[in-house]
Amino acid sequence: MKESITLSPNQGISAMTFRGIADAEQLATLTRILDDYCELSGMEGTHPAREHLARRLIALFSGGIDSPDDIKMALDGIARDFQANHGVM
């Protein structure tokens, strides 16, 4: 059975209490989520959508979404919207 990973600093709490910052471990996890997502989606290096997705990822996390799976699902929708509005991806 796959272990559930959460970015919440408190075990047993599903959403992070917004403090305005991410600690080093949370930031590393968010970076890994973004890197993996972009690699799987073919957005290498300086792809125009990457920075947009990074900003939205931080907004999602700040809004209390701390499950990597939930973040990735939200990024799918954000990437589709970006593609539709910018004709890129």
Image (cartoon, rainbow, N blue to C red):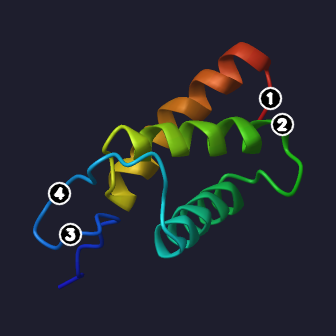
Residue drawn at the location 54% of the way across and 73% of the way down = 24
Crowding around mark 2 (Cα neighbors within 10 Å: few <14, some 14 to 19, many 20+) is some
Query: Which mark lies nearer to you, 2 or 4?
Result: 4
Farthest residue toward the right? 46
- Residue receiving disc 1: 88
Q: Please name the amino acid that badge 1 sits on.
A: Val
Query: Which mark lies nearer to you, 2 or 3?
Result: 3
- What's the mark number on residue 48? 2
- What's the mark number on residue 57? none
22, 36: nearer the viewer? 22
Number of residue marks = 4
**Label 4 residue SS:** loop
Residue drawn at the location 17% of the way across and 57% of the way down = 14
Residue drawn at the location 35% of the way across and 57% of the way down = 69
Picture quadrant where residue 51 is located = top right
In primary-sequence order, the first of circles 2 and 4 is 4
43, 57: nearer the viewer? 57
Q: Where is residue 41 shown, x and y percent of the image? A: 67, 52
**Label 3 residue SS:** loop
Q: Is residue 54 left or right of residue 66?
A: right
- Residue receiving disc 3: 10
Q: Please name the amino acid that badge 2 sits on.
A: Pro
Q: In this view, does 81 lie to the left or right of 88?
A: left
